[in-house]
Amino acid sequence: MNKKTNVIFILSDDHGAWAMGCAGNKEIRTPHLDRLAREGVRYDNFFCTSPVCSPARASLLTGRIPSQHGIHDWLFSGNGPHDPESVGEEATGIEYLQGMTGYTDILAKNGYVCGITGKWHLGNSYVPQKGFSHWVVTERGAGPYYNSPIIRDGIEEKTTGYLTEVITEEALSFIRERHTDTQPFYLSVNYTNPHRPWKNNHPKELIDSYEDCRFDSIPLEKDHPWIITTPERENVSVPREDMKVYFAAVTAMDICIGKIIDLVEQLGIREDTLIVYMGDNGFNLGHHGIWGKGNGTLPINMYDTSVKVPAIFSQPGRIPQNNVSKSLVSGYDFMPTLLDYLNLENAESDILPGESFLGDLLGQEQKSREHVVVFDEYGPVRMVRTNQWKYVHRFPYGPHELFDLVNDPHEKTNLYGQSDKLPIQQELKAALDNWFVRYVDPMLDGTHEEVDGGGQQYLAGPKGQGRPAYRQRERTNKLL
């Protein structure tokens, strides 16, 4: 019997879908991601389930939307005993996804050796969980890129050098150790690039290499009326300095991804290994006058630059090469697609909203999907997106938005409330309501939580029913 397919899942942090050469950006250097796209399928319309890291990552792992898994914002605390933002009971660490099945649980039960290196940020970084037997993670969602500590199987270790390279070396070591095993392996390589901090946190030679870049690929616009002060905007008076560092952070990660691809080829397991590259959420680097993602504004935004993510799938001999799919797919579709690809069953599939897009991935005629739209949420903000229309509803009072993406692809003109648009507005609102009614766990409903992008401190849920109350911190420059 042939060995099962290995999986290497590479996940970046705050990498906008626009920031790759293969996506049409002629200024940023991503030769290895471009190569991976040539050797597989790149999705041009892949959406995160929430435009911020922790809920989006939880949805990829569990197939649940935020209002099913209860992570509605980036996790401010509960990451472990040395997290400076954790106090009281939360300082011991909170396992936010306890009792929920991740696809890595299913892989582990089916003989896969599962490893993770890099960012976790789904609660208690000191306790290996979700089927991972190899556990080397960062404690929090973000931090310094040089001499940053890591958590290895519950023990903190000091590191030297550039964190991106540390994460990569751990990944390379895992692959070398496992590639001859009779058991297949699954490896999550979770980079923090290109997430802040930026200044003095990436290789100077790479930053300097963008000195002459014109940055014509970035539509730098005047500040959005809802913009807030975020740490992403470190050089307010000289935005090109931040652009240089952001581009350099992406290129630094791309170089490391190239090392992983090269090793897999050198070891002779490239055709036995599915490599997936994905971002957790989108990012605005001046797009729409925003520096950040969904929580770069208040009210929270759902612009395509915030909710679209890069997504590339490659396995020579099985996935068609040099293909770009325009299909609308979402982070909640990833788990059922991966399990379908590996021919593994999920006993809980009937309660999950996602559907496999395996036929599309393999270049076959995709069987009809129940819905041809995608849905997003970020606390009390919900979105429905079709090929032409986007409707954003902000509970309880708005403001709401309606965009015609065919005639207004950059989402400049809000058509909400215009009399001739009322039929489509009502149709989309009904679709939005019906879909969330079907899949939301009422105990974990994000519209009942005080989410404004400032970070989640406790488990979600109603007060007095076995869960600590969700509490928002004051929104200052602590956004992650």
Image: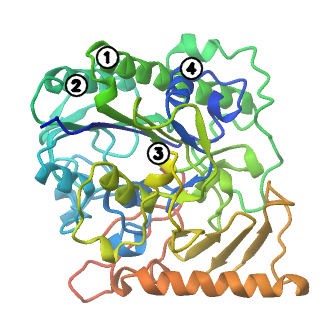
Point out residue 321 in the picture as x, y percentages from the top left corner. 52, 31
Upstream in sequence: badge 3 or badge 1:
1
Relative to the observer, which residue lies in front, 175 or 82? 175
Q: Does dot 4 land on a helix, a strand or a loop?
A: helix
Q: Pointer 1: residues within 10 angstroms few (<14), some, or many (20+)?
A: some
Cβ–Cβ under 8 Å for marks 3 and 1 = no
Write down the residue under mark 4: 31
Upstream in sequence: badge 3 or badge 2:
2
Write down the residue under mark 3: 362
Relative to the observer, which residue lies in front, 476 or 340? 340
Is 354 on the left-hand or right-hand side of 464? right
Write down the residue under mark 1: 263
Relative to the observer, which residue lies in front, 1 or 396? 1
Is 19 on the left-hand or right-hand side of 442? right
Q: Distance between the residues labelled 3 and 1?
A: 25 Å
Image depth: mark 3 or mark 4 in front: 3
- The residue shown at (61%, 41%) is 324
Q: Taking 338 as reference, is 336 above or below it?
A: below
- The residue shown at (33%, 24%) is 270
Point out residue 284 in the picture as x, y percentages from the top left corner. 66, 46
Tell me the tag on residue 274.
none
Query: Which three-letter amino acid code belongs to the residue tagged 4?
Result: Pro
Q: Pointer 3: residues within 10 angstroms few (<14), some, or many (20+)?
A: some
Q: Does dot 3 land on a helix, a strand or a loop?
A: loop
Location of residue 111 by image quarter: top left
Q: Does dot 2 land on a helix, a strand or a loop?
A: helix
Write down the residue under mark 2: 175
Relative to the observer, which residue lies in front, 287 or 145? 287
